[in-house]
Image: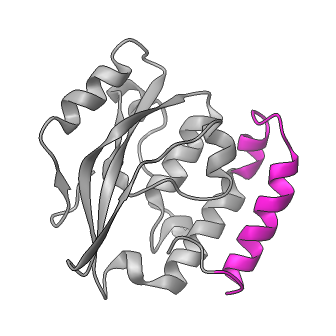
Amino acid sequence: FVDADDELLPNCILRQVNSISKCKNSFSVIGFREYWNSEKYYDIYPTFGCVASSLTLINIGPPHIYLFHKSVVQDLNGFKSDETVDGGHEDYDFILRLVSKGVHAVSVNDIGVIYHKRDGSMATNHEKMKKTQVLVWMKNIINISKIVKDYSNFIINYTYQVEYLNNKNDGIY
């Protein structure tokens, strides 16, 4: 799931394959370097305790930081393309659906991909991105809530999502 302007670094796939090779019920998440208009960049290492709880707050990263077993993708019929994700967050929807089915995330503590954000790209269309993030969250939250033990996060995260949609905080996008 790599866009034409994004990059996989040497050994990225090997590191991710090794991280999930012994567990078929898992997917790999690797760190990324996020460039803004090719000028400044940030190295981001996705870390989380309970991935389901983390996902109730935010999308962990761009689509190409993930590596999945083929069978896991097939079991969920891949990415959705309905109106919920019209404008972005197909990956967020897919990851939420995976985790709600009990698939585990394995984090690789290394930079494996380059993610370019440019003015005018889909990721910088704030209105569409806000809308789809909240729609995806709302569509999946019931299933995620069944596997998270600490429900206090849901009150906080619900408030965050509503404020985000109403432009009262900036979120990640």
Q: Is residue 75 magenta?
A: no
Give the side of residue 61 with respect to residue 127, left or right.
left
In percent of width and height, residue 21 lies at 33, 16
Give the side of residue 147 with respect to residue 30, left or right.
right
Please tell me in which quadrant of the rendered image residue 165 appears.
bottom right
Residue drawn at (45%, 74%) of the image: 87
Depth order, front residue of 53/36: 36
In percent of width and height, residue 163 lies at 75, 78
Depth order, front residue of 24/12: 12
In percent of width and height, residue 148 lies at 77, 36
Give the side of residue 122 with respect to residue 40, left or right.
right
Please tell me in which quadrant of the rendered image residue 34 appears.
bottom left
In percent of width and height, residue 28 lies at 39, 33
Query: How are the residues colored?
Result: one colour
Residue 32 vs 42, above or below: the answer is above
Depth order, front residue of 153/84: 153
User: Which stretch is magenta?
Assistant: 141-169
Residue drawn at (47%, 47%) of the image: 46
- Give the residue furthest to the left: 10
- Give the residue furthest to the top: 22
Residue drawn at (31%, 88%) of the image: 120
Residue 99 vs 163, above or below: the answer is above
